[in-house]
Image (tube, helix red, strand yellow):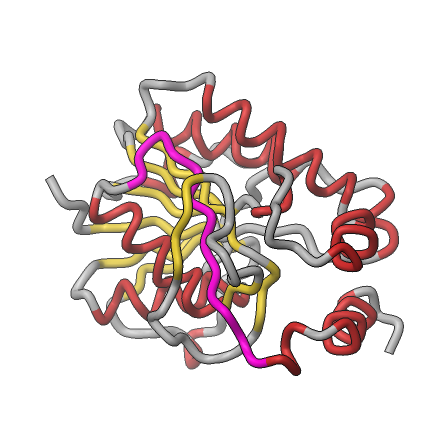
């Protein structure tokens, strides 16, 4: 049965906002779960807003009435998080999965990253810079994936996007099994949000790790562009 009400953790984040918007266009009911929900005048029609601390609260009540769960949570890349990332992916996702089980929900889609596994399509300079800098955060994602694999009673999907890009959706994602398709090492956040909704509503990719991305213009795939983005994320400019 196709889910009708989707809970989205991290609904106010970059990818989460796109997932919420796309779910609404599909006629779905959305339960947006964030640590700090938006003010009343910033809320969308068709969305139920609930507050929850993923690391501390009992999450089952936040999932009441939901048929499927999306975790759009992510750890920001900062120097401190790169050295010692919070266990948001491992412990946080485990708590979400447990709450889903308690609420009678089987289907859950989460954001991982293509770079948790060797990716032949990545430029060498990208592997030696960005992937290396994300080492500890990627280790957290691997723990998350292993935790999900140990729970076959859940219809989980661990989506592995390429390097994220903040641009409008194209609807032209390429999808590979664990490995990014040839020529695709970037993934637009909007396309990722759409794919997460598709994953939990369609039933495709259950117990899989789809790697998603698309070719982009040279200026978005260059060393200079990605170096600038990484520096901005780290608060260096």
Q: Residue at x 34, y 49 (%)?
A: 7
Residue 214 lies in the magenta-colored region: yes
Residue 94 lies in the magenta-colored region: no
Magenta segment main secondary structure: loop
In the image, residue 132 sits, relative to residue 57, either above or below, namely below
In the image, residue 158 sits, relative to residue 149, either above or below, namely below
Tally of numbered discs? 0
Q: Residue at x 58, y 36 (%)?
A: 92
Q: Residue at x 57, y 44 (%)?
A: 53
Rendering coords of residue 31 (x, y %): 33, 54
Closest to the observer: 75 or 65?
Answer: 75
Rendering coords of residue 178 (x, y %): 48, 39
Query: Looking at the image, which residue sits at the far left?
Result: 1
Left or right of residue 10, residue 7 in this image: left
* Quadrant showing the C terminus: bottom right
Left or right of residue 42, residue 132 in this image: right
Q: Residue at x 55, y 41 (%)?
A: 54
Rendering coords of residue 93 (x, y %): 53, 35
Q: Quadrant of residue 42?
A: bottom left
Closest to the observer: 112 or 182?
Answer: 182
Q: Which residues are magenta?
A: 205-217
Q: Quadrant of residue 79?
A: bottom right
In the image, residue 207 sits, relative to residue 222, either above or below, namely above
């Amino acid at each position: 049965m196709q889910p009708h009400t989707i809970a989205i953790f991290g609904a106010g984040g970059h990818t989460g906002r796109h997932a919420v918007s796309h779910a609404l266009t599909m006629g779905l009911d959305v339960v947006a779960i964030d640590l700090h929900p938006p003010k009343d005048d910033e809320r969308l029609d068709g969305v139920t807003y609930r507050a929850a601390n993923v690391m501390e609260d009992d999450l089952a009540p936040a999932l009441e009435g939901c048929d499927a769960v999306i975790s759009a949570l992510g750890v920001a890349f900062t120097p401190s998080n790169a050295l010692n990332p919070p266990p948001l992916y491992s412990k946080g996702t485990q708590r979400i999965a447990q709450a889903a089980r308690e609420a009678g929900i089987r289907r859950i889609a989460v954001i991982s990253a293509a770079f948790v596994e060797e990716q032949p399509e990545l430029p060498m300079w990208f592997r030696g810079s960005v992937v290396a800098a994300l080492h500890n955060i990627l280790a957290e994602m691997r723990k998350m994936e292993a935790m999900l694999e140990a729970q076959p009673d859940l219809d989980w999907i661990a989506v592995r996007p390429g390097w994220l890009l903040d641009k409008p959706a194209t609807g032209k994602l390429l999808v590979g099994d664990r490995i990014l398709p040839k020529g695709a090492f970037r993934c637009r956040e909007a396309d990722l949000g759409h794919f997460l909704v598709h994953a939990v509503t369609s039933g495709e990719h259950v117990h899989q790790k789809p790697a998603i991305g698309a070719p982009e213009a040279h200026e978005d795939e260059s060393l200079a562009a990605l170096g600038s983005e990484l520096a901005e994320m780290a608060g260096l400019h």
